[in-house]
Structure formats: C-alpha cells, structure tokens
Amino acid sequence: MNFQVTVLKILVAYPDGFAPMEDLKRDMAILATSGRDWADRTRRLAARVPDLDIFCQGLVERINGGWKITARGREVLHKMEAPPAAEPAQQAPVDKAKAVSETEPVPPLPQAADRAKRRRERRERRREARERARVNAS
C-alpha cells in the first residue's frame, strides 16, 4: 500500500479536506487491512507520480492536530486518477503485459456493506484474542 496516495485519497473524502489524526489513523488501518485490491490500486496511482512527497510538494499541510489536503494536492490526485493519455500511433508498446495492466480500470472502493462486514469480523477476532490472552494470563 502506498502511504502517501492513501493519505490523499482519505483527505479528499473529508469535508473541506481536513481529517483529525485519530480519524486518519483509523481510516488508514481500515484500508491497510482491506486486502490486496487497495494496495494494487495505490501502487498503480503512485506509479503515475514517481517522486511523490505530499509534504515537501505542499500537497498536504498539518493543521491543529490533523492534516488537510491543499488545492495542489487535489490537482495531483486528479492527475493520478485521470485515464492515461493515448500514445502516438508510431510508438507501439514494448511489453504487452505492461500495456494491458496500465489500461485496466481502477477497481471501485469496497461497498459500505463489505466494509461493515470486515469491521465486524475484525472486532470479533480482537475480542477472541483478548479472551485468549486473559485465559493465558491467569
């Protein structure tokens, strides 16, 4: 999972682009455990902006215990998510497998019901782990 792309995607979803650190950490944890699709998606997006540095480039700023995406950050995210420009007809792709992967649509984010189900499953696993730890400690 690409941390910086994930931060941009999370912040753009919040009103005014601002998220307190607690919310940002929670959302990062959810996405980090959501599976391989999210990691693949962020990797593809990050490949479009190879030297991405959200703080040095002024894409995100730290404000009052949270982070806020800037207008420049929104522009860069929009550029990453835009479909790739058509290449001139003279240049044929050298690696067809790579060309196919670049044209694949970015998969949609998991639906709310799927996220809720995963959240319930994680809560249950944590509860079971606490119970095992309690039994082992006594």
Image: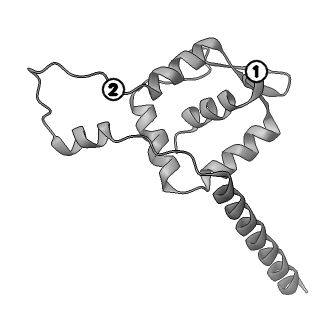
Q: Residues within 10 Å of mark 1 (few under 14, many from 20)?
A: few
- What residue lies at 39% left-to-right and 40% top-to-bottom? 105
Q: Considering the image in quadrants, where does the C terminus appear?
A: bottom right
In this rendering, the answer to whether 21 lies above or below 85 is below
Which of the labelled discs sits on residue 16, or is there none? 1
- What residue lies at 74% left-to-right and 43% top-to-bottom? 25
Looking at the rendered structure, the kind of residue marked 1 is Asp
For residue 10, side relative to residue 3 (left or right): right
- Contact flag, marks 2 and 1 (Cβ < 8 Å): no
Could you say which is closer to the camera, residue 80 or residue 62?
80
For residue 65, side relative to residue 78 (left or right): right
Q: Quadrant of residue 133?
A: bottom right
In this rendering, the answer to whether 17 lies above or below 37 is above
Looking at the image, tell me whether mark 2 or mark 1 is earlier in sequence order. 1
The residue furthest left is 90
Element at label 2: loop
The residue furthest right is 138
* Cα–Cα gap, marks 2 and 1: 28 Å
Q: Label 2, on which residue?
A: 84
